[in-house]
Image (cartoon, rainbow, N blue to C red):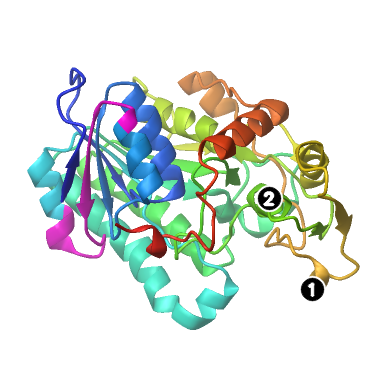
Amino acid sequence: MILKGENLNVKFFMPILITGGSGFIAVNLAEALLKLGEEVVLFSRHSPPKDVRRFLDSLGGRYQIVLGDVRSRERVEGAFRDFQVDRVFHAAVITADAERERRDSRSIIEVNLLGTIEVLEAARRNNVRRFVYLSSSSVYGENAFDSEYLDEGSTIPIPDTLYAITKYAGEKAGLRFKELWGMDVIAARVGTVFGPWERNTGVRDTLSAPMQATQLAMRGKDAILPREGRRDWAYSRDVADALIGVLNANLPHYEVYNIGPGVVWTIEAWCKKLMEVYPRFSYSFAISQEEANVSYYSPRDRAPFSIERVVEDIGFRPRFGFQEAFSDYMEWIKQFPDFWKGNYDHYNQQG
């Protein structure tokens, strides 16, 4: 266990546990929560990168890092018991591509589903106030392409990959725990996210297209796009705000919420903005999928989210449109210019 940032803020609530605590969305959540004066427990197999820890230290507030695997009942229960956890974001996941599915399907299922059960069981035993399960746009599967908008109530999930199947199973398991034991469980279906602190963690195989294009520009390489890449790309800081809104909502009316920006833009437009910042950078369109060096992980662009529920019921208002997200992302890169140097994956960031 690593203890950081003691003493600096008044504690209004008991600690918030974030599983997968060294991951991309988890770090954005920790940043936002610490700025609100919350106490945070980051539960993860590995400590966050050095740059992340230094940044969180600079925010004041109080956070703990607990090293453990969500498949370990002892480690999970210990985190709940030792810190008297009050609320939970369950974000631990293997975001698998097809190659990992072929290579290591068992681990995907164990972490994404059985790990979720371990965290739900511990939350039940320790009477947490609210449990927010971070689900995914991937649960819509084949139905993601046949609607104008993806709606929580009317678009039926048809998950078609191990990642999507286990995320949807985790959703349903959490809501079954709610029915059986009266737990306060909410599933938040997070859209396609990019933004500060995204990196190759070793278990995140589907790195966002904006990040891929930006890294190419920074390295002096041109982007070759499969197509224009039209989607409601969600900025990570907006996602954190929406998730915190769900966590703290008083008497929410729904069990499932889409989390997205409510606007659509293209990776081609992102590349055009990159050309203004990196004059040597350019982009083109691939003649074949194999030629592309930016991946969208799907041959088609899914429909955008309807976000009426989270806007009207939770009061979420996105802060980052296309231009705002681009400007903020470029400022973050200036602040942490070495974060992506080399491979900069989760494992060579230790120490």
> Can residue 95 be seen in the rendering of this structure?
yes
Q: Residues within 10 Å of mark 2 (few under 14, many from 20)?
A: some
Please name which of the two marks, 1 or 2, marks the residue nearer to the observer.
2
Q: Is residue 68 magenta?
A: yes
Q: Is residue 177 left or right of residue 340?
A: left
Q: CA distance from mark 1 to mark 2?
A: 22 Å
Which segment did they paint magenta? 58-76
Front-lying residue, 328 or 313: 328
Q: Indicate which disc, 1 or 2, sits on the residue closer to the N terminus.
A: 2
Q: In this orientation, which residue lies closer to the viewer: 128 or 326? A: 326
For disc 1, the marked residue is 290
User: What residue is disc 2 on?
Assistant: 218
Q: Position of residue 341 (x, y in %)?
A: 54, 56
Q: Is residue 72 above or below residue 214?
A: below
Left or right: 193, with 226 as reference point: left
- Please identify the residue farthest to the bottom as the structure is shown: 103
Amino acid found under the numbered disc labelled 1: Glu
- When asked about the image quadrant of residue 143, the answer is bottom right
Q: Residue furthest right?
A: 287
Q: Position of residue 149 (x, y in %)?
A: 70, 39
Q: Is residue 92 magenta?
A: no
Residue at 19% in and 64% down: 72
Quarter of the image for the C terminus: give it: bottom left
For label 2, the SS is helix
Residue placed most toward the observer, 173 or 229: 229
Classify mark 1: helix, strand or loop. helix
Q: Position of residue 62 (x, y in %)?
A: 22, 31
Amino acid type, label 2: Met
